[in-house]
Structures are given as structure tokens and as C-alpha cells.
Image: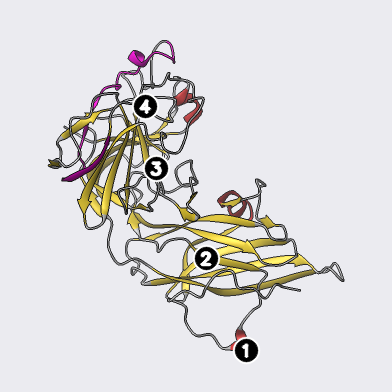
Amino acid sequence: MLAALALFSVPESASARPDSKAVLSPLAFRVVDRPTPVLGADGRNHLSYELEVINQSGLTVTLTKVGTRAQNNVLGVPLTGAALSERTRLNNGGSGATLVAGGSAMIFMDAAYAQSRRRPARITHGISMSWPDPTTSEIRKIRFAGVPSRVAKRPPMELASPLRGGKWVAVSSCCTLNPHRGATLAIDGTVRVPERFAIDFVQLNTDDRLFSGSISELSNYEYFGTPIHAARGGKVVRVVNNRPEQVPGTSPADPTIQTAGGNHVVIDMGKGRYGFYAHMKTGSARVRKGDRVKTGEVIGLLGNSGNTDAPHLHFHVMNSPSPLQSSGLPFTFRKFTGQGFTTDLAALTAGLDPAIERRLIGPHKNQITLDNQIVNFGN
């Protein structure tokens, strides 16, 4: 028997549905934050968001299909099979899209669609699932359309680049399931996804490698100490400047959520958007809390402080000044030039040839970089 307790309240965007067509589901779903479409460097709009799932029953239930819908049509490619399993993170540490009784999961959605398609005002979901009947062992199946959410109306903020020059690799960028997307945190009991659109920038040297010589020497990373620029002007609301550099090639032994960002600067860019610049070089911040900065102004230097195993700039936009108690917001860069993609991240971080794939080469405007894309931000 399915549990009658409703764990999630009905959202304000829910529409009336005749009782004759209602489906009793063992799984309950919730959209974590209202999604916002963002234009990727592939020329497609990406609606990236999370579905929280709870198994309210005493059954073992397998999700077989989850897809985004808008204007009564499919939006993007529905998740099925291996793709659904890969995008589903079970909170009990398991893998796949099967939830045990009382289990829960997070599904990381990315509905990508053509620029020519009308921007959706709201979305729903087409969901299919199955489970063995406890009395007959027969497989029962249901499918339904539901779990509505409004789409945020405010467009992504357009930004200048926080870096200069070429061969910057946008590691863990939009819109795959990567360490940034998967970093959902329960902060004081509320699920937060602050790094939903975060990027880790590292730079290739003249040999197209991350470093030369020993992996543990900061001086072997040519981009260590590179100036970091304000991607948009605003008021500085947070500065941490005294945390030590970490030894590259190894992760900190005792990281905490409070020290993860290392030395960092947060800038209030207006309209409820805050820029987060993390892992800066010790003592390099050139701004103080309360300062006002202009777009392009140098605010510090790229470093290796905090929870990091190689020098890089971690950058993202969030809806509050707190790197922890916030939700990640999409943004676009006004211009950059695509130089290809790294196809072997393990080789890149080991200082080997990252096997560059030459695609999406050339100028891009008002787009967000894609995962492991190599870009030139110019002067």
C-alpha cells in the first residue's frame, strides 16, 4: 500500500487535474529551484535544474523515464536507461535509478533546446516508473505528467571575463553532471545548490599542459598569480585574504565547508546577483569590504588556497552574499573565442597531453562556456 502522507506541498504553479485522471504514485518529486534558461556555447538554450525524489512507499521502485515538458511538448531529450541512471544520485550512496522503500535521490536535469523555440513560462514532467507487486511479483507500471514549476523570468546576467588571454579551460562548467552540479548541500536543513553554474578555470601552457616539472611546485603552473578581474562592477561585500596556499597534487587533509573557498572575494553586482571569486593567492586581494569596483578592475590574483589540488579560479554567480546559503544562478560571458575542448581531464590534471578536440572554434557572444571548453578571453 502506498503511503498517504504528502511529503511535499502542492506548488503554486500546480494546475487543476481531474480526479478521474489522477495517478497515485509511490514516488514524490519536487523542483529544487525555479530554472532559468541559459544560452550555451553550443548555440542551444539549457534549462539546468534538480528534481528531488522521495519514495513514500514500502516498495522498491525503478524510474524508467523522466523528461521535461513545455507547451504540451517534450523539451530536450527525456532521460532513460543509462542516461537516467547517470543523472540520478541516490542519497543512500547507491547507483542507478532504483529507490528502495523510504529512499531518496536527486535527478540532475538539463533540458537543452534550440534558440528558435519559444521560451517556456512553465514546465511539467513526463515520468514513468515500475515496481514488482508484493503479492503477485508481477511488474506494475505507471506513467503520468506532473510536477509543475514556473520558469524564472529574469534572464541570465551578462558578464565580462574574470580573466585575460587564451587557453583557459572551463573545467566542470555547464551543463554536464560534474562536481559542481552535484554539490548539493543541506545547510541548516535547506537544500542548496550554490555551484549549479560554477566554473574552475585553469590555463594550458605553450605545450598545452597544465604544468611542467613537479606537480607539487606552484611555480611550475605558469598561470599561478594571474590577475583576476571583476566580471561586473559593484560593491565588495566579503573578503577573505589570509588562508594559506595548498600543495598542488594533493587535497587538503581537513577541509571544511567554511574554508573550502580559501581566499575569496564576493561582489554585489546588483539585482540580487553576487559574484564569487575563490581560491585566490594568499594576501593578494586588492579590495576591501565596502569598496566599489568597476567592471574589469583587478581584485586579486589566482591562487591555490582552500579545498583545491591545483591552482585555479573558481567563479560562479549566486543569489545571496553567502557562498553556502545560496543558489547558483546562470550567467553568460559577453564574448570569448572557442579553442576546442579537453577530452581527457585525468591527463590534464596529471600534467599530460589533454587530447584537445577541435570543435566550436571561433567567436562566441553572450553564452556560457561548456564543460572542459578551452577559450580565449582576449586582452
Residue 260 place in picture, x, y as percent: 42, 35
- Whether label 1 touches label 4, CB < 8 Å: no
Say which residue label 3 marks.
173
Say which residue label 2 marks.
30
Say which residue label 4 marks.
305
Per the image, is 143 magenta?
A: no
Question: What's the CA distance linking mark 4 and mark 3?
Answer: 20 Å
- Mark 4 or 3: the one toward you: 4
- Whether label 1 touches label 3, CB < 8 Å: no
Which residue does the image show at 44% across and 19% down from the upper left? 351
The earlier-in-sequence mark between 4 and 2 is 2
Which residue does the image show at 27% across and 63% down from the upper left? 154
Magenta stretch? Answer: 214-239
Which residue does the image show at 51% across and 25% down from the upper left? 253
Indicate the quadrant containing the C terminus: top left, top right, bottom left or bottom right.
Answer: top left
The amino acid pointed to by label 4 is Ser
Residue 28 place in picture, x, y as percent: 60, 68
Question: What's the CA distance linking mark 1 and mark 3?
Answer: 44 Å
